Amino acid sequence: MPSRLPKPLRSFYFLGGLFFVVWMFFLDSNDLISRFRMSAKLNSLENEKEFYQEKIAEVQKDRDELFGTRESLEKFAREKYLMKKETEDVFIVVED
């Protein structure tokens, strides 16, 4: 009784290789879907890293400004925390 499949497709090595490919692409813990998810998460985390590095640089600049001279400390307090002397009035100008 002849089989309808060609002889190379009935080979033990072909079936073993096919099983291996199916296992690696779909069933393994490192399958393609997991790889794509991990790649997307990596990109997201790299973007977050850039954001936080920019924030760290900004805070470092503010820190250097804060611990500088007395004039820079006063300027920092006035701009960031809207502090003023008792005899002064503060006007906040909001630009559109």
Image (cartoon, rainbow, N blue to C red):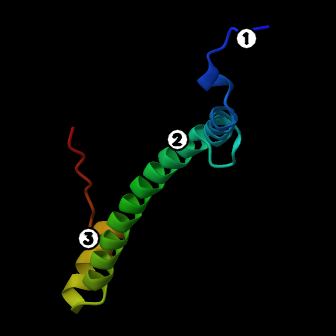
Which residue does the image show at 49% across and 44% down from the upper left?
Answer: 40
- Mark closer to the observer (2, 3): 2
The residue identified by callout 1 is: 3
Which residue does the image show at 24% across and 90% down from the upper left?
Answer: 68
- Mark 1 is on which residue type? Ser
Query: Is 91 on the left or on the right of 19, as rendered?
Result: left
Q: Quadrant where the N terminus lies?
A: top right
Whichever of labels 1 and 2 marks the residue nearer the N terminus, that label is 1
Give 32 or 88, whichever is nearer the viewer: 32
Real-space CA distance between mark 1 and mark 2, rounded to the nearest whole angstrom: 40 Å
**Residue 45: where, in percent of width, then height?**
47, 55
For label 1, the SS is loop
For label 3, the SS is loop
Give 49 or 93, whichever is nearer the viewer: 49
The residue identified by callout 2 is: 36
- Mark 3 is on which residue type? Glu
Dot 1 surroundings within 10 Å: few (below 14), some, or many (20 or more)? few
Give 8 or 81, whichever is nearer the viewer: 8
Q: Is residue 83 above or below residue 47?
A: below
